[in-house]
Image (cartoon, helix red, strand yellow):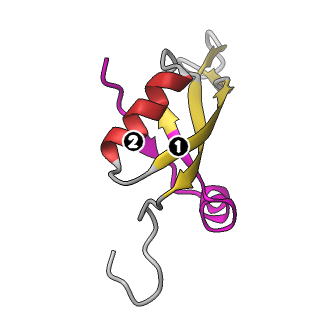
Amino acid sequence: MNILITPRATEKSYRLATAQNTYVFNVPLTANKQQIIAAVEAEYDGVKVASVKTAVQSGKSVRFSRGKNRYPGTTNRKDTKKAYVTLSEGEIKMFATEGEEK
């Protein structure tokens, strides 16, 4: 089963990538750690995954209204899953450094 992984471009993920060689990806809720390892190693050549930590972030509660003071209610956004992938060998060129083109 092929899964789609997308990198998260945030300040925290940039700090983790530069300091600890840990990269953060958005992954499907149904993906397990073995599938995430296989997807990262297949997409980025020359990298060897040391460990994977996953976290499921529950969707926020959002208020909505259908008209002025009429039928107010709440709903929830979708849950998301993040994978913190630590590499033992190799490096992923995810963020452009100064002097390089994006």
Given residues 58 and 17, the one toward you in this image is: 17
Secondary structure beneath dot 2 equals helix
Which residues are drawn in magenta?
A: 1-25
- For residue 18, side relative to residue 41 (left or right): right
> Mark 1 touching mark 2, by CB under 8 A?
yes
- Residue 14 magenta-drawn? yes
**Element class at badge 1:** strand
- Where is residue 102 shown, x and y percent of the image? 33, 74
| Residue pictured at 48% horizontal, 47% vertical | 48
Query: Residue 18: horizontal and vertical position, in percent?
Result: 62, 68
* Above/below status of 75 relative to 2: above
In the rendered structure, find residue 41 and report the number of the disc placed on it. 2
Indicate whether 67 appears above or below 92: above
Q: Which residue is mark 1?
A: 49
Residue beneath the point at 41% across and 42% down: 6
Number of numbered discs on residues: 2
Residue type beneath disc 1: Val
Numbered mark located on residue 15 in the image:
none
